[in-house]
Image (cartoon, rainbow, N blue to C red):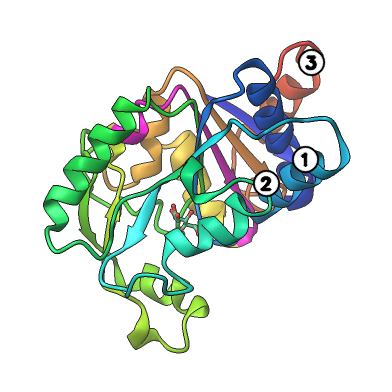
Amino acid sequence: MEIVIVPDAAAGGELIATAIADLLTRKPDALLGVATGSTPLPIYEALAAKVRGTDLDVSRARICQLDEYVGLPKGHPESYRSVVLREVVEPLGLTESSFMGPDGSADDIAAACFAYDRALAAAGGVDLQLLGIGTDGHIGFNEPCSSLASRTRIKTLTERTRVDNARFFDNLDEVPHHVITQGIGTILEARHLVLLATGEGKADAVALTVEGPVSAVVPASALQLHPHATVVVDEAAASRLKLADYFRATWAAKPSWQSI
Ligand code: F6R
């Protein structure tokens, strides 16, 4: 696992957007897995700026969703489908036809989860999966004690995650209790995992993920099992890493031709 400590969220966004641009240059129809929440926004802004300001062509890119609330009406502005369309798909000049996600309003949620896992495989698998991290160590919405082999399925949010996400809704009662999330086993099938964490509030979760044991109680620690996982953290989120100096030195000494 590679750990990159950047000065701030904007620098993290730029670094990761550059890696995505490189991927889309090598493989124009790459399947990019996206996360929602506040953390990845600087990535999407930096990528959209590259599309506007350079000759980067993302017109053949494909975008897929990591997770989704269950039970929000279709088109709800805080459904993750709406969020991804608004924050990623449209700013990149793509349309809904480039996008795939699980149906959180399906009558048969179990069938929708199974269908989404199959659709990801049929699409050739995810080339680069962006991840955020919850304060409780979740990735996607795999809450603590999720099976490290799990597939896309319904999960119940912890109260802590519902409180963390209440800022997107009018009040806590509106935050759904249930979600569909790619499983940890599903996430681990992506060819490259890139987790961005910013802010002091993520420092404990980052330290456990990077320097703690692999454990279902810290779902993000499963990244240690992946052959190509990159964890990008700002100084605040890195503040509890014991090996921070080593990670800084490693990054500083990295050959310039080698990307994340
Ligand atoms: C959402 C997702 C979650 C978030 C996490 C952090 O698609 O995958 O794991 O990444 O809850 O959210 P923020 O970035 O808002 O702190």
Q: Nearer the viewer, residue 242 or 144?
A: 144
Looking at the image, is 216 positioned above or below residue 41? above
Which residue is disc 3 drawn over? 253
Q: For the residue labelled by badge 3, is the local secondary structure a helix, a strand or a loop?
A: loop
Q: Nearer the viewer, residue 38 or 148?
A: 38
Looking at the image, is 112 positioned above or below residue 83? above
**Dot in front, 2 or 3:** 2
Which residue is disc 2 drawn over? 92
Provide the residue span drawn in magenta: 186-200
Question: Per the image, is 153 magenta?
Answer: no
The earlier-in-sequence mark between 2 and 3 is 2
Label 2 Cα neighbours within 10 Å, binned few <14 / some 14-19 / many ≥20? many
**Dot in front, 3 or 1:** 1
The earlier-in-sequence mark between 1 and 2 is 1
The earlier-in-sequence mark between 3 and 1 is 1
* Relative horizontal placement of residue 188, taking residue 14 as reference (left or right): left
Q: Position of residue 126 (x, y in %)?
A: 43, 29
Which residue is disc 1 drawn over? 51
Q: Position of residue 17 (x, y in %)?
A: 70, 37
Res. 21 mark:
none
Label 3 Cα neighbours within 10 Å, binned few <14 / some 14-19 / many ≥20? few
| Pointer 1 with pointer 2, Cβ within 8 A | yes
Farthest residue toward the right? 53
Q: Position of residue 236 (x, y in %)?
A: 69, 54
| Pointer 2 with pointer 3, Cβ within 8 A | no
Q: For the residue labelled by badge 1, is the local secondary structure a helix, a strand or a loop?
A: helix
Q: For the residue labelled by badge 2, is the local secondary structure a helix, a strand or a loop?
A: loop
Taking the spot 74% from the left edge, 47% from the top edge, the residue there is 48
